[in-house]
Image: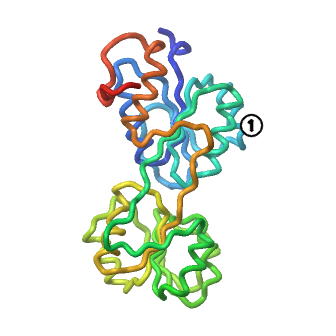
Amino acid sequence: MSLVDVPHVLVLGGTTEARRLVETVAGWPRPPRLTSSLAGRVARPGPLPGAVRVGGFGGPEGMARWLRAHRVDVVIDATHPFAATISCHAALAAAGVHVPLLALRRPGWVPEVGDDWRVAGSLAEAAGLLPALGRRIFLTTGRMGLGAFAHLDEPWFLLRSVDPPEPPLPARHMVLLDRGPFTLEGEREVLRRHRVDVLVTKDSGGAATAPKLAAAREVGLPVVVVRRPPPPEGVPVADGPEEAADWLWSRLRGALGEGPPPVARRDSPG
């Protein structure tokens, strides 16, 4: 089989799930060509199997041109659950060039007994809830969009992100640069040391960031949870890398030839 005959899979990545997916697919007996596309918002991403491109596409039209030029056969949108713009562009581009698209989204969080949650539809709505809830805010929504909180002069904010956030930022703040996975003991210490009385988070889901919710639950802190946007209408969704690998295998197995199924593939229908 020549290189041009090998199916080409574009994974819009940057998440743990995207990494696990490409690592799984790269280990197939006869893997497809893999290209991971990263937004470039993390300064030092780890190595990935296959090719890696960094940066935007120039909107849905630019992505469609890229898909045609690089003869992409399948697109998997494994971006962050809040990366609504790139997900919308991917849906439009894939539909425009008639390429199958799957959204890989880890399940969101569900409140447990003892949780004190307020659900907000946006960062701006979350900011509007804070003055009535507390004065020392642990803000774990990432480094983007913090301008929604910049007008709040009274509360003090602990801003946690992987890379330094860019202004505008709240007037009273401290930046904590850290990367998950986080531990329950570590999150307890952050809340205690900084005397946090409110936690703000996006419903990004996943085990790596769940300990902060457990730590807040233990001490009865109110938590403002920003609701995630839905995936584009009509795009199928996989809840995890294994399910996404099943879906991908079911579409490429004919082109990749017969042989043993991928290790991660379950015996459930594809």
Q: Judge from the rendering whether residue 104 lies leftward or rightward of residue 151; answer left or right.
A: left
Task: Give the quadrant of residue 192.
Answer: bottom left
Residue drawn at point x = 41 percent, y = 31 percent: 245
Choose between 195 and 168: the one closer to the eye: 195
- Image vertical order of residue 194 relative to residue 10, above or below: below
Residue drawn at point x = 37 percent, y = 10 percent: 258
Choose between 245 and 72: the one closer to the eye: 245
Which secondary structure, mark 1? helix
- Image vertical order of residue 146 relative to residue 51, above or below: below
Q: Which residue is mark 1?
A: 61
Q: Residue furthest right?
A: 61
Q: Tell me residue 105's x, y (percent).
A: 47, 46
Quick one: quadrant of the C terminus? top left
Q: Tell me residue 1's x, y (percent).
A: 47, 9
Q: Residue furthest bottom?
A: 154
So how many labels did they put on this image? Answer: 1
User: What colour-coding does the image apply?
Assistant: rainbow
Q: Tell me residue 144's x, y (percent).
A: 58, 64
Circle 1 crowding by C-alpha within 10 Å: few under 14, some 14–19, many from 20: some
Residue drawn at point x = 36 percent, y = 32 percent: 24
Q: Residue furthest left?
A: 185
Q: Tell me residue 229's x, y (percent).
A: 58, 55
Residue drawn at point x = 71 percent, y = 30 percent: 96
- Give amino acid for label 1: Glu
